[in-house]
Image: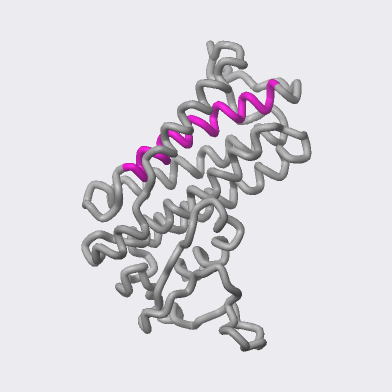
Amino acid sequence: MASLVIKLVYVRCAARTGRLINELRTRKILCSDRSYATEGDQRVPKIYTKTGDKGFSSTFTGERRPKEDNIFEALGNADELSSAIGLAREFCLDKGHTFTYQLDKIQCILQDVGSNIATPRSSARESHLKRTKFNAQVTADLEAWIDNLTGELPPLTKFILPSGGKSSAALHLARTVCRRAERSVAPIVRSGEVDPDVAKFLNRLSDYLFTVARYAAVKEGKEEKIYKKSE
């Protein structure tokens, strides 16, 4: 099921991230820039494959693992993170924010994150690793965005609560999902199954989402709620 999720979202991000490929046990390539139907075949493809009905799913390397495996837990969290960012993006678009192109890019990078996670090194061939190698430069891009946004924000002197309007609150929600994704990636990075740069990216992404949430609140003229100790 995880490979199917990656396939479906791929089409929207293909221009930015290149091909995102997954295989079934038959080793057929699922993702391409063509439609799902074979050439000359006009039949409507089915959305379901039934390959996960018994509680197992396939990695990109063709390995079958239980759906509760750490690999699929991390994949699910990365997918949920992309969905949370997509929802926040819609609120930001409604307000005309100029940073939405950054959210678009991040969602595409999260497809690369998923591709890397779905390629456990213990069963990967060199061809697998080459196709799913994660680009560390994207973390540096996040840092540049954070620095630019921070330059337009008032200094942070107190703890703030998720607030500041719909755009800001949705971005804060995405930030918390990002932290969960990072936590689920940490053990498989330590075990050597996933590129450490993936964990670095997620760590920096949560900082970006916090910063851009504050930026959205300021640009919309919304007040951020300040933490006050309960009496």
Which residue: 54% across, 29% down?
Answer: 210
Main secondary-structure element of the magenta-colored stretch: helix
Q: Say left or right for 111 vs 83.
A: left
Relative depth, front residue between 86 and 66: 86
User: Looking at the picture, does residue 74 appear above or below residue 186?
Assistant: below
Q: Say left or right for 202 vs 86.
A: left
Residue 205 can be seen in this image: yes
Residue 231 can be seen in this image: no
Q: Is residue 89 magenta?
A: no
Q: Say left or right for 24 vs 164.
A: left
Which residue: 49% across, 83% down?
Answer: 50
Colouring mode (rainbow / by chain / secondary structure / one colour): one colour
Residue 137 x, y percent position in the rendering: 40, 38
Which residue: 28% across, 52% down?
Answer: 188
In the figure, residue 59 lies in which quadrant? bottom left
In the figure, residue 105 lies in which quadrant? top right
Which residue: 51% across, 39% down?
Answer: 176
Residues drawn in magenta: 197-218
Quadrant location of the C terminus in the rendered image: top right
Q: Is residue 204 magenta?
A: yes
User: Looking at the picture, does residue 208 appear above or below residue 90?
Assistant: above
Residue 100 x, y percent position in the rendering: 65, 38
Q: Say left or right for 186 vs 107.
A: left
Residue 178 x, y percent position in the rendering: 48, 42
Tally of marks:
0
Tell which residue pokes out farthest to the front in this image. 40
Residue 194 x, y percent position in the rendering: 30, 52
